[in-house]
Image (spheres, rainbow, N blue to C red):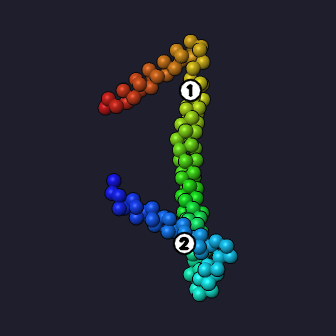
Amino acid sequence: MVWWITILSVALVVGGIGTGIWMWGGKAEPARRAGAFSPLLYRLFLNRFYFDEVYQLVIDYVVLAAGKAVAVFDRVIVNDTGVNGTGEATNFLGWLGKHQQTGKLPNYALGIVIGIVVIAAVAFGYRG
């Protein structure tokens, strides 16, 4: 630990607190004189260099706009396409497939016969 830095820091803090009490304590006469001397500088210090206002503008126009863009991406790409899209595709393919499986043996036999006829027609058609 560096003692001179510690002592200097404590002295600066105590000096700053003392100056603040002197400037703003009681009727705040030194602060009034400073405000009369330079109203622009006084207003700047009084409003803390407008850091809060600038910070709020950055949040309102940059952070919230980026948040809206991310929210749209999440809703449209991730949820609607990735999650709901795959679910809807599976639902549609299941709906198409349900007509293929009837549980009736004659329907399956007819499908096999039609398949064999199509394969034979294609095979004999390319023979030359």
Disc number placed over residue 97 in the picture, else none = 1
Label count reads: 2
Q: Amino acid at mark 2?
A: Thr
Labelled disc at residue 105:
none
Q: Is 128 above or below relative to 59?
A: above
The amino acid on which the numbered mark 1 sits, given as a three-letter code, is: Gly
Q: Is residue 35 visible?
A: no
Q: Position of residue 124 (x, y in %)?
A: 36, 26
Residue 15 in the image, given as x and y percentages of width and height: 50, 68
Residue at 56% x, 26% y: name it: 97
**Inter-mark Cα distance, 2 to 1:** 83 Å
Q: Residue 19: which disc?
A: 2
116, above or below 96, in the image? above
Residue situated furthest left in the rendering: 128
Nearest the viewer among 93 and 110 is 93
- Image vertical order of residue 51 relative to residue 2, above or below: below
Q: Residue at 56% x, 55% y: name it.
A: 67
